[in-house]
Amino acid sequence: MSIRWIVLITLAAAFIFVLEWRRIPDRPTKAAFTFLILAVWAMSIAVSIHSDLPGPDTLIKTVLEPFIPNVPHQ
Amino acid sequence: MNDNKGLESILQMQRELLARPISTSLRSNTDVLRQLFENASDVVFHEFTIRNGPLALLVYIDGITDTKELERHVLAPLKTDGTDGELGWEAVIQRISVSSSQSVRTIQKAADELGAGNPLLLLEGQAVGAFFAIPFWQMRAIEEPQAETVVRGPREGFIETLHVNLSMIRRRLQTPAFKLKKLSIGRYTKTTCAIAYIEGVTDPNLVEEMERRLKDIDVDGIVDSNHIEEWIEDNPLSLFPQLQATERPDVVVSSLLEGRIALLVNGSPFSLIAPVTLLTLMQSSEDYYERSFVATGIRWLRLLISFIAILMPSIYVAVLSFHQEMIPTALLLTISKSREQIPFPALFEALLMEVTFEALREAGIRLPKQVGSAVSIVGALVIGQAAISAGIVSSPMIMVVAITGVASFLIPNYQLGLAIRLIRFPIMFCAGLLGLYGIVLAGVFIVVHMLSLRSFGVPYLSPLSPIQFEQFKDTLVRAPSWALNKRPHLTGSIWNKLRVRPHHSRLKKG
Amino acid sequence: MEKKSRISAAQLCLLMYLASSGTGLMSSPSVAASFAGLDMWIAPFWGLIGGIACLWIMIQLHRLYPGQNLIQYAEAILGRIAGKAISFLFLFFVLFTTGYVIRQMTDFLSNSFFPRTPPLFLGVCIVFVCAAAVNSGIEVICRLPVLFFPFPILMMVVIFVPLFPDLKPVLPIFEHGILPSFWGGCALQLWYAVFCFATFYIPNVHNQDKLMRWSMLSPILLCLLLAATNWSITSILGDAASMYHYPFLVITRFVSFSEFFEHLESIVMMIWVVAFALRIMYGYYCAAVGLAQWLKLPDYRPLIWPVGMLLLLMSVWDIKTTQFAQFDSLVFPAFYALCGIGLPFLLLVAAWVRKGMTPASQHKTSNASASPQTQQAEQTK
């Protein structure tokens, strides 16, 4: 199951990279594009292997939870 | 290697011959021309002496020149009356009673004019030649256009000859503001094209833009107006036509009066109109020749049916595969009974029948007229019936395909109809993959594409996309002619607003 | 950036309204119900304050720094490092919310309509379509709502008119005091704070004089829509409203026209998908443009596909399906309000201080006289 997703993610990233890289006119954009694709690819692989990897939700919760009053629900 | 050298030497010789100017020696001119037109057996060289005058050479291409005119008005006076000893051009032109003659100084121009059917006259001792504009060839009679028939309205259609087409438009636009700009495109075909527009109504930037795009074309040949269309359209990769191709002069004249420009191409009965929007392509000239309420109803019918033509097979596939709860129970039972023995999923069944229908349609075009329609209708029915009895497709599917096929005939513009027919298939795939969600996504994708499409700068979905409320009078409904008092505002700079004199409405009393 | 595209204030208003109402109709009733109970129809009015504040702040900031969006003027206001940090937080907010919306949509479709399709595939499809739209530019994104807005109106008419006889006034009001509806309004900042994305669109609006009026219309319309919807949900479903995740969908199942067109929820789904697509495009454009400007790149178009992948990643990362985390406590509304309202307010105050005007004098003078003052301040700089 996880192998399938990893292959798919890698294929998608490679596909996007190959299609877009040549069409980018200037170097800073090329560098930013490559970095972004690599970062997203790495994070996606990490998330698909460890589904419980703490992410933005947990980050927000841990930062803000102490400050929020406990409101009664209806 | 040898072939290439041979080819290169042939082209080099042609270029070298064409680059020469007309020389004063008639002998050398004759040699050059004979060499150039070697093995072109329809070129006639007639060397003669003008009575009491110089030696002369008449060259023309038999079949595209008016030889009667030539012999009666050019050769006869020169041979019988002559120039009384004068050797110059003034005396010769004096004798000739053809009104349109112009001079040539280079072999290139001489060859171009010969190719256009204009005979060439060269004199001994003169480095200038003359050609007479008397082309004549067999052409088709003016008939009703096959693809754009109307019940009420003119039944003239363009033919392949440019000056006849221009005359048909000139007859309807008898104003000096109607301008024609001629260009010649294509190195071998030297096709004459004319840009037609009305000065003072059309944006001059539009004319300039069209001229610029045409001058950029450098090809061997243009055979049909579609070739030019592919060169000048804004987005060559889009399915949707960005110029309107029409065979009817009245359509051209109405478009010119709205501020558009028309491009007529010699050799093609289809003229191109630009700029054009999607809703313009959905209009038929007949809308304007029938009563306004009726025409409005027919327009709405056409819009509705176009949606059916695009979406019906996809909705069928989507609803049957994913959203069965939407079908009313009685209908659901009938459909499932007829689909019981079908081994294929709905998507495959739909694709099979749609492709078969398109194939029948294409085949029907090539069959001779007498047999064609009968065979295609009978063929469709028989194939459909046989397929149902063989258990390959279900009868609701045949119904859907038939309705879709009929619906696609309602689209007035043939190119748009083709685009819609083609676009059904990707939408069907999306429907088979993801049901109504897929249809919605495909629809959004197509709308996004159309929103970014422009035809000579005019957004493709005007007047819906940048909303122009004034234009709704002519797109969503068909208001009567006395209410259509403003021209459409197509491009930015000039807008000649009024086309009906103000305070001239029929609704006011007195 | 490239030449400025032109959109009109009315188009922006429609875009913001449609973008927020799509997701709002679907999940905001359950949020409001869980905090406010029977008072859930009052909650949108409390939340409106946040929406108006958010837009007002963004327009003021644009008047101080015309032609720029938050990512660009954050550095001018707070200096390079603090500015980049603040704008990074804002970008994270944009990416996070848009990713969450994608998750909301794939959950909704997967639970109700496509149980056997992997939800990520549904997300990929819609991100693909939205990427095509973002690639075509801001004008296309702002023209789509104009083409589309009759459909939600039609849908509301078709759903509410048959239900009209069943609607009754919702009593008692304020049974547990004012606070529950207030907390409901706070929770609704999940939708009202998203109006802050306007900062990426405002520089392209060509009729700036009408901007304030048109943009204020947007949260007001949203408030009225949510209030009306919550009211009808409460009067039809009563106390059971808080039990459903999608009360609005439940109501649509009650509608049937003459026993023939039953089960119209697939049609509702189609309209919702377009509303969701608009919401995703709305945020996707902001994310792509914001990221490109944060990295000081000349054009945002090459970044569209990586940002799309990033959005899909955000939609699956750390969000459990059974947990509607954003709706249980006020943590996420607080985060949204902090980034959408608090952060721009901080920037506005800092900008005022920087440009030599205190907030006190700003409140006393009218907005019209503020602009020539700021222009003078800029010229003397």
Image: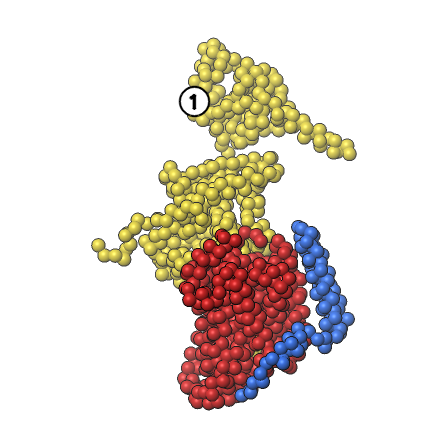
Chain colours: A blue, B yellow, C red
The extreme left residue here reads B510
Q: Residue at x 49, y 39 (%)?
A: B194
Viewer-proximal residue among C235 and C38: C38
Compared to residue C154, the image places residue A28 above or below, namely above
Percent position of residue B449, x then y = 56, 58
Secondary structure category for the residue under label 1: loop
The residue shown at (46%, 81%) is C42
Q: From the viewer's perspective, is residue B128 above or below residue B428?
A: above
Instruction: Give x and y (percent) for residue B477.
Output: 39, 60
Q: Nearer the viewer, residue C265 or C331?
A: C331
Q: Nearer the viewer, residue C235 or B165?
A: C235
- Residue at the image point whose x is 36% and y is 61% from the top: B293
Residue toward you, C316 or B198 = C316
- Confirm whether residue B370 shows in the render: no
**Amino acid at the residue labelled 1:** Ser
Residue tagged 1: B97
Q: Residues within 10 Å of mark 1 (few under 14, many from 20)?
A: some
- Where is C220 relative to A27, above or below? below
Q: Position of residue C76 (x, y in %)?
A: 57, 59
